[in-house]
Image (cartoon, rainbow, N blue to C red):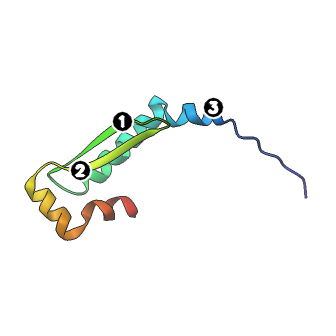
Amino acid sequence: MSDVKIELNYAGVGELLKSKEVEMFIKEEADRRAAGLGEGYATDVFQAGTRVIASIFTETAEAAKNEMETNAMLKAVSG
């Protein structure tokens, strides 16, 4: 076997995690999952300290009620 040593460029990984391309990918994925939940759900994407983060949240009382009864958001993002 050969001895392979991989050295991670931490600055490069950090730039990648905050890049516009990753932000667009994360936004598309969050929007796709929110669309699968139905009406009353929305998304937000923002730049945290080290990376891009997306969130899905309810905008209407009906969606909030559905979320409390079914945990739809948890199911949408976990599988």
Percent of width and height locating residue 8:
71, 40
Percent of width and height locating residue 53:
40, 42
**Quadrant showing the C terminus:** bottom left
Counting residues from the start of the chain, the first of labels 1 and 3 encountered is: 3
Q: Mark 1 = which residue? A: 46
Dot 3, crowdedness within 10 Å: few (<14), some or many (≥20)?
few
Q: Vertical placement of 17 versus 30: above or below?
A: above
Which of 38 and 65 lies nearest the eye of the viewer? 65
Which of 48 and 12 lies nearest the eye of the viewer? 48
Helix, strand or loop at label 1? It is strand
Percent of width and height locating residue 62:
9, 58
**Label ID, residue 57:** 2
Q: Mark 3 = which residue? A: 11
Mark 1–mark 3 Cα distance, whole angstroms, equals: 20 Å
**Label ID, residue 78:** none
Mark 1–mark 2 Cα distance, whole angstroms, equals: 14 Å
- Looking at the picture, which amino acid does disc 3 mark? Ala
Direction left: furthest residue: 61
Q: Vertical placement of 76 versus 35: above or below?
A: below
Q: Vertical placement of 35 versus 76: above or below?
A: above
Which residue does the image show at 35% across and 42% down from the upper left?
28
- Looking at the picture, which amino acid does disc 2 mark? Phe
- Residue 23: image quadrant is top left
Dot 1, crowdedness within 10 Å: few (<14), some or many (≥20)?
some
